[in-house]
Image: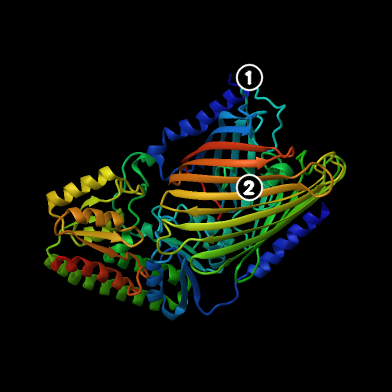
Amino acid sequence: MKTIFIASPLIAAAAMFTAAPTAHAELSVITTVTDLAAIVQEVGGAEVKVESICRGSQDPHYIEPKPSYMVKASHADLLIAVGLGLEVGWLPSIIQGARNPRIAKGQPGFLEVGSLIEALDVPSGKVSRAEGDVHPEGNPHFMLDPIRVGQVALGIAKRLSELDPVHATQYGTRAAALEHRLSDKTKAWQERVRKSSVSKVITFHQTLRYFFARFHLEAVAILEPLPGVPPTAKHILEVIGKAKAEKVQLILVENFFDPAVAERVAKDVAGLRIAVVPVAVGGDAAVQTIDEVYETLVRAIEGTKSHG
Amino acid sequence: MIGLHVRIFAIWVYCVLVIPTADAAASAPQSMNPDISVSMLSLYRQARRSGSSEAMPGSGASLQEVELQLAADVDPYLRASTILSVHPEDQPPASPTATESMSAPPDQKYAIEPEEVFVETTSLPGVIFKIGRFHPALGRHNTLHAHAFPFIDAPLINQRLLGADGYGDVGISAAVLLPLPWFSELTVQGLQGHSPDLFAAQGTSALAQVYRWRQLVELSDAATLDVGISGGVGPNFYNGRTTVRGGDFSLKWRPSKGGKYHAFAWSGEYLQGAVDRRPDDSRLAGFATWMQVQVGERWWLQGRGEAVGAVAGGSGRQTKYSGLIGFIPTEFSGVRLQVDRWFDRQERAVNSLALQGVFSIGAHPSHSY
């Protein structure tokens, strides 16, 4: 009996000393997704060391809260998440298991960038799981809008500056440069999409909602009958009907979904082309920067010029 | 007939769930109400001895368990969880621990129990302290809630050594994340001892002590190896000492690409216990090993083999083989069909088939990896 009561405070003291962060020349940042890691790396430069929990080819809705992620988070000065409910199924247990008070919600070491942008598809009234895997705070896939990503970069720079005021000027300069670059490139990408003459698209999930809004594309149909619900035979027939009626030219399938259903639809619709696309940095070997994510999507849209 | 305590519980649930949610639409997401979830397990089971057409005790349909969980931050330093379990009272299980003389009561009563009620620290570096009633870390499986069991029932050794409902107790816990490059967690717990099967303080001041040391390494982006050793010592109901030792492992694979559709896990657990001065099963050891394979987005195939035997004296071995197919359409619902064949202390085979429905509503925390 006495052993446990003597041992507990000793264990706690040992933990506090052993868990105390050693002095690093750089800020240690952990992000939930690779897009955020890419932005942090560009804004932070040599002043940060950044790692992402989710891989670019993984569906960020369904990450298993591995204890190894807790170890990574235990050393972090800053944890950056997308928010809007994207990580609600796994991030809280990682934060709790990390036992790192610096990154607890409400602390300067915790940042949810979803609060920095205007969200789309915010449901009004009560939401229910009968509607599928809905996000009560809005669609969380805003990292596919380069303009919103520019806003996110500025917000990240501001938080990095609060944690590391010495390099605030560098963070601000890099974030502004990223924002301007993406803003300029967006105009060029919009022009290329306009010239592609593709305006109506089918996709698997609502991942590309913000991308479509920015580049004036219409999602005529979604292969999932409800968010998070696999396509049913009845729904596939409805999608085929819509694709024919609307003369849709392109199905974009996020590369963490099985393209078999899209292939089934394309088989029945003349001129309908499929592109399996990465939707995050690292989602493909050729996509290693945030710019390359958008470039790859624009090329997938342009690819419909040569009908296959 | 619903007992008085169940009626009181129903009124309490109404007050907690319905009255606050009248304003939920207006106040969400700014509400400071706790996260509330309800998990329901319904079960249909048939068990028969080889060569007999008579159903064993516990056969038939039942409400296996309803778990109500409330969790919220107390303040910037603490988080509280309350998990209440509603389950049949005095219901003989159709399991290897049942005896043929047990019969189902004509009038099904239900009990409401605090399964886990605790507060834990959220702001201490490197350690989580927890105080209250919880599932001690005697092995990996004992920390799981019923709706998160890999199979419909707990392993034989857990049922025989830790009790049919697992081992829960009041105490204090410290879980330290050791400063190593891999996940290494040392958990030390002091428990009052409220279990007739395991630890029971008999008016003495001696607490039971439990420890678990867990390591998890990433073999690759897709695979992890998780191993643990655990043990416990403390006074028992028979004025003797109980000692428990155990080891567990879990090898998991889920690819970064295509991981939505395929996964594999191989796990195992060994427990050995000595309950001094207990008339039967004073020394008991057993192990269980199982494999889980995700064969499609919503489908799982699983198999388990296990054995329990007395280490010295006591009753004989039990062995059991189980197969399970699961249809898990979402994180919040699932149907599982399990077939078992076990050989009990009388060395007579028993065949069992069980169909379980698991359904959850509300905001439930993620399960442990």
Are the numbered discs 2 and 1 placed on the same chain, yes or no? yes
Q: Amino acid at mark 2?
A: Val
| Side of A73 where A11 appears, left or right | right
- Nearer to the camera, A190 or B324: B324
Q: Position of residue B139 (x, y in %)?
A: 68, 53
Which class describes the residues within 10 Å of circle 2: few (<14), some (14-19), or many (20+)?
many
Q: Is residue A105 visible?
A: no
Q: Residue B225's image quarter?
A: bottom right
Q: Earlier in the sequence, mark 2 or mark 1?
A: 1
Foreground mark, 2 or 1, reads 1
Colour setting = rainbow
Asked which secondary structure carries label 1, the reply is loop
Q: Is residue A38 left or right of residue A64?
A: left
Residue bearing mark 1: B106
Can you tell which mark lies on residue B119?
2
Q: Chain of mark 1?
A: B
Q: CA distance from mark 2 to mark 1?
A: 39 Å
Q: Secondary structure at mark 2?
A: strand
B194 lies left or right of A269? right
Depth order, front residue of A57/B281? B281
Q: State the residue lying farthest toward the front.
A: B51
Where is residue A218? Give x, y as percent.
19, 55
- Under mark 1, the amino acid is Pro
Q: Chain of mark 2?
A: B
Position of the C terminus of chain B, as image quadrant, is bottom right
- Identify which residue is drawn at 48% across, 45% down: B326
The N terminus of chain B lies in quadrant: top right
Residue at left offset 72%, top offset 42%? B160
Q: Are marks 2 and 1 in contact (CB under 8 Å)?
A: no
Q: Residue B89 vs residue A266: left or right?
A: right
Camera-side residue of A216 and A119: A216
Question: Above or below — where is A249 with respect to B192?
Answer: below
